[in-house]
Image (cartoon, rainbow, N blue to C red):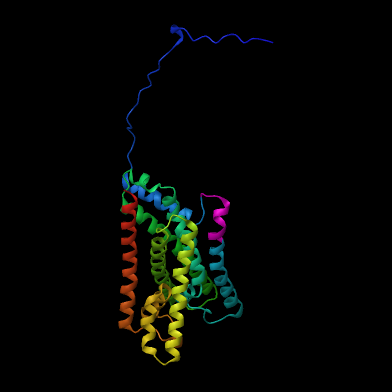
Amino acid sequence: MAVEPPVTAPSGDQTRIHNIGYRSYDGPRLGRAYARRSLYSQSLRGAYGLGRSVKSKVLPMLLFVVMCVPAAIMVAVAVATKAHELPVDYTRYAIIMQAVISLYVASQAPQSVSRDLRFKTVPLYFSRPIETSDYVLAKFAALASALFVLTAAPLLVLYIGALLAKLDFADQTEGFAQGLVSVALLSLLFAGLGLVIASVTPRRGFGIAAVIAVLTISYGAVSTLQAIADAQNSTGSIPWIGLFSPVTLIDGVQSAFLGATSAFPGGIGPSDGEGVVYVLVVLGLIAASYGLLMRRYRRVGL
């Protein structure tokens, strides 16, 4: 059997100490604004699975297609039949597709914040120049922007199709602008509510279930109560009941101020005075959502 030679320690003249030292960073310091923009961009891309695995892209891209396909079909029918108007108003489209929008919020709001909570990376963000307001603002703006892309894209399809069908340019432009205002409010409201609910738990599955429950159960309950009020000829209470669901809130705002036809029973939307209350409630919920997120992340970042 071969015997390995003993290992001898290197002699003193073979050892070396390399003093590489440390140099201070003398490059550009981009600061909070750059960090905020980077977090916004990364969160917005993540809302559609960009820069992530193929599996992460499937659901948001599928929901985007589902939102746009009905609009494309409507455009094709309008062009083929030479219709004088589109089958659906611009302000009505998001209300009709609210189930798809709710599912998108439920899937992407937890993705935006739950992983940071679960893996406790939020304090790492705040160890840099970025502050709580920067983090919350970037996440809020990113999800609202993603929702606006989701809801405005089919309106753009309808608008382009209407122009191809040679419908009245002024009427279509006015309706398209009203639709954009409506979905912008919807995007801000749904993004705020979705992020607040998702930030309560680090478990993504629980966050998804909670967001779906809040958005769908509230809409179902409000619609049922409005139907009961209509059946009992208590029409005066129908607009006030609509204040208790995000979907009916947006419906009330656009029917009061954007010329939309109300989806309330009997088509009874809020009056101008009631519409002001709807606008104040929507803006109040958006502001309250931002405030609750600030309080939540101040505690988490400690």
| Residue at image coords 50%, 66% | 103
Which x, y percent locates residue 46?
48, 53
Q: How many marks?
A: 0
Q: Nearer the viewer, residue 152 or 244?
A: 244
| Identity of the residue furthest to the bottom in this view | 233
On screen, residue 274 versus residue 144, left or right, reads left
Vertical placement of residue 285 versus 44, above or below = below
Residue 271 horizontal/vertical position (percent): 34, 84
Q: Residue furthest front?
A: 1
Q: Position of residue 161 (x, y in %)?
A: 54, 72
Image quadrant holding the N terminus, namely top right
Is residue 111 highlighted in magenta?
A: no
Between residues 63 and 106, which one lies in front from this camera angle? Answer: 106
Is 232 located above or below residue 50 in the figure? Answer: below
Stretch of the chain drawn in magenta: 51-61
Q: In the rendered image of this protein, does residue 23 appear above or below residue 151?
A: above
Q: Is residue 172 visible?
A: no
Q: Residue 228: give x, y in percent of width and height.
A: 45, 87
Residue for point 47% across, 72% down: 216
Main SS, magenta region, reads helix
Which residue does the image show at 37% across and 83% down from the upper left? 239
Residue 158, above or below 49: below
Q: Is residue 72 visible?
A: yes
| Residue at image coords 37%, 86% | 237
Q: Left or right: where does residue 294 sit relative to residue 96?
A: left
Residue 93 located left or right of residue 137: right
